[in-house]
Amino acid sequence: MDRRINKLDAKIIDKTKELVKDHRRVLTDLADLMSYSFDASFGTYIPDVVIQPKSTKEVADLVKLANQEKIPVYPRGQSTSLSGGPLPVKGGMVLDLSKMNEKLIIDEEDLVAIVSPGVLTSEIHKAAENKGLMYPPDPSSSHVSTIGGNLAENSGGPRGLKYGVTKDYVIGLEVVTPEGEIIRTGGRTVKNVTGYDLTKLIVGSEGTLGIITEATLRLIPKPPATETMMAIFQDLVDSGRAISKILSSGILPSKMELMDQASIIAVENYQPCGLPTDAEAIILIEMDGHPHAIRDEIEKAEKICKEVGAKEVRLAHSQKEREELWKARKLVSPAIVKIKPTKISEDATVPRSKIPDMFRKLKEIKEKYNIHLVVFGHAGDGNLHPNIIADKRDQEEMKRVEMAVAEIFKAAVELGGTLSGEHGIGTMKAPFMEMELGSIGLDMMKRIKEAWDPNHIMNPGKIFPEPGQKLVLTE
């Protein structure tokens, strides 16, 4: 599938300066290029040039030039990607879209937000809430990640359990195609069944089918009340059973997050929150909706947790107590990197009924490869985050980690799950795509890519594995 792509030379860089006008937005110094050579995953790849477009026309002109010259193009936001999505693996042109951040319009009557790709997701949350509305997708990185990156990777977050992920709230897009044309998909109506749903196709395509330059997002009324509780378990598998039982009882929490013992200990060592370090797992549960209804649901969830084996349930009685309960979950990521410097963050996802089986399998993998495996995440929708903490300078340890990661993916797929619930495929999971999709399923995706991007300039090296490509976590 890979095609010959050309090296970007000085003549083409001169042409980009003609298209962008302000030469300060065309970066070629090595120090600048280095700062665009990585994301929050693995690998360092130096681009030939970084361009910071400010308008859709500039993006279209640059992509048209790249397509004519067969130069790779890598759209990029703030590069919080955990799967390698924006990495310029074949050199070429990086387009930094974080500078296109001026449009953020809330239309209360149509219940939509119109945004440009560089707007921070947390700014959309704030603007919607100021009008009594809510944009539900809430990735943990929302305070630093751009909506363009969320759209490319189809990001999720803890509210995914009740409200779904990014693609469930995108109803229209403006897109620059790989040939440099500007198209619109969908619109600002909730119902739109005209022809193929290109909006859904492009969201989550990881910048391989075009560059999103504007999005129309669906908003919903903000729920009037919230209740939060923490359930503490002596057995990790029991916590998985509690999650399945709560969901099958007809209760649908807005969030249901899990922390295993390793996460609990890491947080207590990092910034003590009063968590029980002898517990094997805790579940944080949040309900939102009408005050009377969620009070009834939180009592029912408490009863189920105790029946399944919870040794203690803590209920929050004020906003301050709610924030205290969630503080521990937010501290997991910074806490675990204090253990060792290298964090491999996965998001293998299984059907809800298989959550206890996946917990059991993760325990086995941890012991088999003698690795520091920490489990936390959005357990309510089966979107677990097995994180492996290692030191990339230790080659022998990293080899064990590579084998463990491959086994985690295999376990998820064998249990009827998927490689990714919200991080995307990028470079990290490309070698495993055929395992989940089969050769024919993968070939159908390649045909779509071929039709959209005949010169294969858009974000090459992502999603589709190169011949013989394997997961490699050493540089």
Image (cartoon, rainbow, N blue to C red):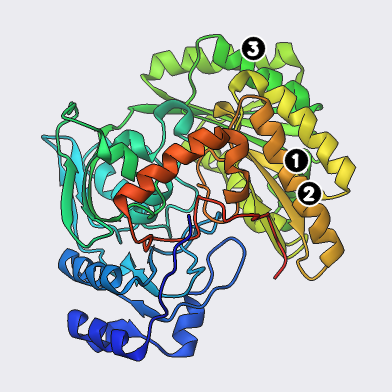
Residues at marks 2 and 1, CA–CA distance in whole angstroms: 6 Å
Which quadrant holds residue 389? bottom right
Disc 1 element: helix
Callout 2 amino acid: Met
**x and y, in percent, of residue 394 in the image:** 83, 67
Circle 2 sits on which residue? 403
**x and y, in percent, of residue 47 in the image:** 46, 77
Front one among 458 and 254: 458
Label 2: how many Cα within 10 Å (few below 14, some 14–19, many 20+): some
Identify which residue is drawn at 68% across, 54% down: 470
Callout 1 amino acid: Glu
Q: Is residue 441 visible?
A: yes
Identify which residue is drawn at 68% across, 27% down: 414
Q: Is residue 78 above or below residue 132?
A: below
Front one among 328 and 338: 338
Q: Which mark is residue 303?
A: 3
Q: Check if mark 2's residue and mark 1's residue have beta carbons within 8 Å.
A: yes
Circle 1 sits on which residue? 407
Q: Is residue 151 visible?
A: no
Label 1: how many Cα within 10 Å (few below 14, some 14–19, many 20+): some
Callout 3 amino acid: Lys
**Left or right: where does residue 79 sit relative to residue 108?**
right
**Left or right: where does residue 108 sit relative to residue 46?**
left
Identify which residue is drawn at 84% across, 60% down: 397
Residues at marks 3 and 1, CA–CA distance in whole angstroms: 36 Å
Tell me the mark number nearer the camera, choosing from 2 and 3.
Answer: 2
Query: On the rendered image, what quadrant is the C terminus found in?
Result: bottom right
Residues at marks 2 and 3, CA–CA distance in whole angstroms: 40 Å
